Amino acid sequence: MAVVFFGGDVQDFPENMENHRDNKNYVKWNLESTAVLLHTYFPDSHVVVVRPSRLTAPKLATFMEFVSSEMDQNRMEFKTFSCYDNFVPCNNCGAPDHTPTHYALQHLERLLQGISQRLRTMPASELLPPATNEPSPPTEEAVTDGDGLQTQEEDDEDMTPLWWREGLNLDKAHLVLIGFSKGCVVLNQFIYEFHYLKTLTPDDDTMMRLVSRIQDMYWLDGGHAGGKNTWITSRSLLETLTRLGIGIHIHVTPYQVHDERRPWIRKEEKAFGDLLRRLGAPVHRTLHFENQVASLYTHFEVLNAFRQAAK
């Protein structure tokens, strides 16, 4: 199985977050640490973390021609907003402009194929941890006979530590798709494309082979600054999603659904879940940190909480 994660604003490589004036406060949730965290939740799965194609700060970028050369050299400090242009058309804040198809599913398939090929052909030295010169302790298979300590031959003695990459094809694995915060716009675009495939191109089953492998989709505190379409509320689109039988997991916090400045998020999230339930979809919804003050920290903490809630 493969878990594919689409992160939110602020999340980036740890070194980039450490060098950012504001984002360093949330470096705990960098993309590499999030990948490790997800692996603890899905220990038998490959974990793929998709970094957005652009990280922007449009309000500042508008005035860059007037700033000093020193500020111009530090523009990376302003990069905060995640834009998943390869999956869904976005403005400079990363707010989506959903279309019936942006070939997001094809892009996902090619991405998984490219990762698989890369992993199969990478030098072993790039995938294995650095070798140590310390002797390995005796294994449990070691036995003692009259001549002293002897090591029993293990069945997997000749097994390469990179056995898992032989014949690796992530695009043919069962898939779990996870969107966090801004990353949920990609999952929403997938819903549009499910409908496009099933209703507008019913004779084209090429992408349906990929869609049929999607087992679960997780929306983790989705939100963006677009003013609408934070959650999909179209009945026809959700009917198509329901017919696919994909497990729907909704995890939200007050940071998004109790934000009075963005009341549409609460209304759309409720409509999304309620309509899917009426249609008979397998929906699980959890509100986390209900009695805590809404903050970016509790928003990020949903990454810790969403799997614990399922236990």
Image: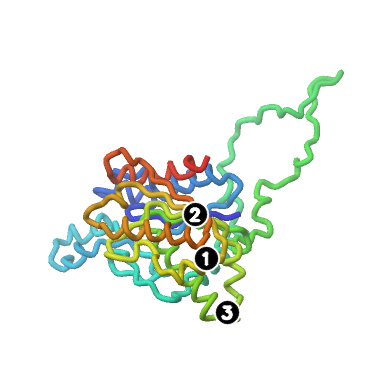
Q: Tell me: 147 left or right of 187.
A: right
Q: Tell me: 158 left or right of 20.
A: right
Residue type, mark 2 in image? Val
- Identity of the residue furthest to the right in this view: 146
Residue at the disc numbered 2: 283
Residue at the disc numbered 3: 202
Position of residue 186 measured from the top left corner of the image (x, y, whole percent): 42, 64
Is disc 1 surrounded by few (<14), some (14 to 19) or many (20+) residues within 10 Å? some
Q: Is residue 179 visible?
A: yes
Q: Nearer the viewer, residue 18 or 275?
A: 275
- Identity of the residue furthest to the top in this view: 146
Label number found at residue 254: none
Position of residue 263 measured from the top left corner of the image (x, y, whole percent): 26, 57
Specify which label sits upstream in the sequence, 3 or 2: 3
* Residue depth check, mark 1 versus mark 3: number of the one nearer the observer: 3
Residue type, mark 3 in image? Pro
Label number found at residue 111: 1
Callout 2 touching callout 1 (CB < 8 Å)? no
